[in-house]
Amino acid sequence: METLQYTIRKLIYSIPLLFGVTLIAFTLMVYFGPDLTDSILGKNPTAEQIADVRSELGYDAPFFVRYFMFLKEVVTFDFGSSMSSGEDVRSILARTVPVSFAVALPAFILSNLLGVGLALLAAYHRGGFWDKFVMVFAVVGMSVSYLMIVIAFQIIFSTSYGLNWFPVQGWIDPPPDYPDATFFEIAYYYWYNYWLYVTVPTLASIFVALGYNTRFFRAVIVEELNRDYVRTARAYGIGNGTIMLKHVLKNALIPIATRIIISLPFVIIAGNLLLEKFFGIPGVGLVTYDAITNGDLPVVKAVVTSTAILYVFALILTDIAYKVIDPRITYSK
Amino acid sequence: MPSQLNRLTVAGALLGLLCFGLTACKKPFADRDQKNPVYRHSSNGAPVSIDPASASTLYENEMVTTVYDQLFEYRYLARPYELKPRLAASLPEASADGLTYTIRLKKGIRFADDPCFPDGKGREVVAADFIYSIKRVFDPKNLPQGEWVWRGKIKGLDEWKAAGSDYAQPVEGLKALDDHTIQITLNAPFPQLTYTLAMGYSSVVPREAVEYYGKEFALNPVGSGPYKLDSFSTRRAVFVRNENYREEYFDLEQEGYDPATQAWTGVEELQGKRLPIMDRVEYYFMQESMTRWNSLNKGNEIHFGGIPVELTHMVADQLKPLKLKPEYAEKFTGMNQPDFGFVYLPINMADPRIGHHPDPEQDRKNLLLRKAIRSAFDWDQRNERFYNNIGIIFPGIIPPGLDAHDPDLPRHYVTADYEQGRRYLEEGGWTAETLPELTYGGVASVQNMQLFEQFRGWMEKIGYPREKIVLKTYATFGDYNRAVRNKELTFVSGGWGLDYPDSENVLQLFYGPNKSPGSNASNYDNPEYNALFQKTKPMQPGPERTKLYRRMNEIILEDVPTIAGLTRNSTAIWHKNVIILPSRNPHGSLLKYIYLKPKTEEADD
């Protein structure tokens, strides 16, 4: 009950926060964002045609009129149509967000799980071989440019210069139209192609994310290992595995959960421009990048707003997670 | 330590097994009959809109001309480019005064089946569709980009727009004499009209589709062209044969085949084939050149691509002409494909520090300054460093392949001569202190930065102070365009893609009334040049017009409102079992002619 009340209270408090975020985002987009006019004028425009286009795009309306229109769009989550392609922005998001999510999810899960595992290993063997090995691996992952990793992984796993196991680029096509295809055949088709296209991007993402995650998680766990209760537990003769997993990890979970939950909005909506560009994945990252460079404001507004809303939810979720992880925590009024 | 290493080995082996396990899994539907082969094309850019009224880029034009018909098209193999009828039954009949064009349409041409039509069956294309389609290009609601093509040209069209673009209202110069006859009346003779009717902007669209799909029409094209769009995303477009496409067969003679220069492509094999040849074409948009190359070289993904500049020497023994290394020559065929356009560096003539000046003495000094800058510009080095040394350098603004191109112009206009540059500065009385600060503009990118540094290096060689050549970059192309249109830059790093093979299309770049915000980025306004341009506007192609065009080119060379020019070449490369002769603009889409021979393993993939 306390959690529910807290959640509702946080949701209400988040309204002015969202209002502020939208105002700042909109101001930035209007005054510093690209102007689509000069991108869509033909080769030999006249001053009159420039005025026509600006009027069609709504650029000539006063700032507050445009902002209130924007607020209406946020409330109804109807951002209209893309200025470039005319496609409904909700359709664009509905088409691309699941793809980006599907690509990001395995890497997100694995890099966090492996990160925690490696951090436990490194922290337990602090100063020893495994600690150094894991940290060297982490530093390498953090130091090498993401772009280089993506190119290297593509060459190693996908090209005829390397192992040639996976496609260079692409995404799952609708299954072939066989009238007698069974449900299992179609399910297998999707399963097979999903892993075919997602494995190399996932490996590249894990390689990079693992370094950051492991270093962070290790620092948190090492701090826990220095606490008195660990020494006490050891004095009681509790096994190392139990101490690490049942006590240390549990107590380290709050910063770990915070980091993981806060990164969720990126996994859900931000997409990954580099992966999408290099592996030909039709996700939201590429759409957002194109929208920013083309000045396609409806798409930019939708992505910025969705990310802001998801962030607010992530913050609330983090607070709820604290209570779940440690029931002693109470929510102040 | 050994046991730790063993664990490591085991972990590595497990990862390898996981990957190998997946690749070793049975391919879905492997035991079924595979469908017809699919040809997979690729380009290095992506289209956004497939609405003919607003589709302006090379990539968008390819999409549009794949799905839609225009009245005319270019013969596939003829060089120089020649028009032939597409939707039209024959080339247009022009009145003696050059003001009225009558065009007859082929009968029985149908739009592709689509839910926008009653019962989903595509109806016949009629003259009224063409008129509706041109009106759309003048309707601001469509954010059209092709309006400039016919602005001021077709009688009553500008007025129709000014009166609110009401489709119920007629346009005096656009008439459907009957269902299959169009009459276009011009305000003044416009010899390039027929070329413009082969451009993507002139595509014939059905009103039903525009009304049915509303704003999403741009991604739901319905045309009478050889293919229908099956799906579209940021990474690819999939086209399937338009079952309503007319009976059209490949004819070598009609396409302008030249065995002496084109036999190597294997196009003879296409003779008599019904168009489009392939049932399904997948068109991939791959901006990353390494990804595009890897996908092509893999063997079972795309069939057509390019060689990244960084890998050129790994793949090819020589570039001019293209000769692939033996291991690649076994798999691929390729050629250097000239761009239909050129790169040049307009100088802002509206800037009194370097351009025209009311004071004759200052005007003379400014001209010498521009000449000095041109003398320092090393086209050969630019070609070598940035264009694989396969670009074509030419003096002036009329590139090879156009009617008025003059191959005998002196080469000193495009040859760096630093000594001469310094002499010009001296003659003009310019010193390091008096030389003005110049702004070089471009979109923020590594290559633009490199181009600028190269340019600044040349300027230093003629004694221009380094700090007086300033780079100004812009986040997007739109922002850059705005700066150009606001005359903020001294040098505009520019390129021009030709719209049709007539020198008028480049000469208009320096026509005074076209200055910013128009296409005249130099803001050049020379009364003599303008008068010649006006005089040649109504002239039909011929020696007299060519002479005047060449004179205009000479004026540009004498007055130096730009440093020009170079036509880029890009290397196209494709699998051995593909028959194609690539060409970019003015052709538009060539997909209907492409043939993937069904012998190889990749054809079965």
Image (cartoon, rainbow, N blue to C red):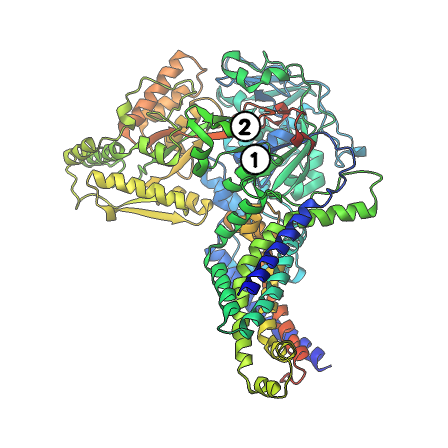
- Answer with left or right where residue A110 lies relative to residue B586: right
Amino acid type, callout 2 = Phe
Choose the circle earlier in sequence order: 2 or 1: 1
Q: Chain of mark 1?
A: B
**Is B554 left, or right, of B184 in this rendering?**
left
Q: Nearer the viewer, residue B308 or B377?
A: B308
The part of the image, by quadrant, that contains residue B13 is bottom right
Q: What residue appears at the point 35 percent right and 43 percent down from the top-left corner?
A: B450
Q: Which residue is mark 1?
A: B296
Q: Are marks 2 and 1 on the same chain?
A: yes
- x, y percent for residue A287: 58, 49
**Residue A316 placement (x, y as % from top left):** 63, 73
Q: Give the CA distance from mark 2 to mark 1.
A: 10 Å
Q: Is residue B164 visible?
A: no
Q: Residue at coordinates 30% horizontally, 20% vertically from top-left?
A: B409
Residue type at mark 1? Answer: Leu
Q: Is residue B554 visible?
A: yes
The residue that disc 2 covers is B332
Q: Is residue B85 above or below residue A204?
A: above
Asked if A25 appears above or below B596 in the picture, the reply is below
Q: Which mark is residue A327?
A: none
Q: Secondary structure at mark 1?
A: helix
- In the picture provided, is B399 more to the left or to the right than A14? left
